Amino acid sequence: MIRMLSVALLLAATMAAADVSGKWTGQMPSRGDVAAATFTFKVEGAKLTGTLTSAQGETTIEDGKVAGDQISFSAAGGNAKILFQGSVSGDQIKMTRTREGGQAREFTLKRVP
């Protein structure tokens, strides 16, 4: 019985949403170049909201989700939708950015202290 409870608690801790609330920065790939970008995230349960700020201005994050150490969301990029997926590890998020119909491009975000 104690063993089953321990396993259940371990699984619950593993499934808990990563705390990515706050500011994150990185060099995001964009049309053959890279540009500084700042992501401001807010997590409520499994819902992720926030903004993306880059040289093109500020964009609202849409369809954001957090499941364990995985995050996903979308944002408008010019006249296309851009899909983002990430894996959280401490103060770093390994991200992929995919323009609808395009190829996935990788970059890393770091938490702003």
Image (cartoon, rainbow, N blue to C red):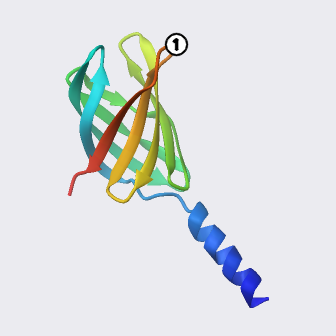
Determine the residue located farthest toward the right in the rendered image.
1
Residue 99 figure quarter: top left
- Give the percent coordinates (x, y) of residue 22: 31, 52
Q: Secondary structure at mark 1?
A: loop
Q: Nearer the viewer, residue 104 or 35?
A: 104
Question: What residue lies at 40% left-to-right and 56% top-to-bottom?
Answer: 89
Q: How crowded is the residue under tag 1: few (<14 C-alpha within 10 Å), some, or many (20+)?
A: few
Q: Label 1, on which residue?
A: 101
Viewport quadrant of the N terminus: bottom right
Image: 83 above or below 112: above
Quadrant into which the C terminus falls:
bottom left
Residue at left offset 41%, top offset 21%: 76
Measured as percent of width and height from the top left, residue 107 is found at 33, 35
Q: Residue 10 vs residue 56: left or right?
A: right
Compared to residue 78, the image places residue 2 above or below, namely below
Residue at horizontal 49 percent and vertical 44 percent from the top: 71
The three-letter code of the residue at mark 1 reads Gly
Give the x, y percent position of residue 31: 30, 14
- Res 8 → quadrant: bottom right
State the count of labels: 1
Apparent side of residue 12 relative to residue 17 in the rendered image (left or right): right
Q: Nearer the viewer, residue 33 or 100?
A: 33
- Name the residue at the bottom extreme: 2
The residue most toward the top is 79
Where in the figure is residue 60, as x and y percent of width and height?
A: 38, 31
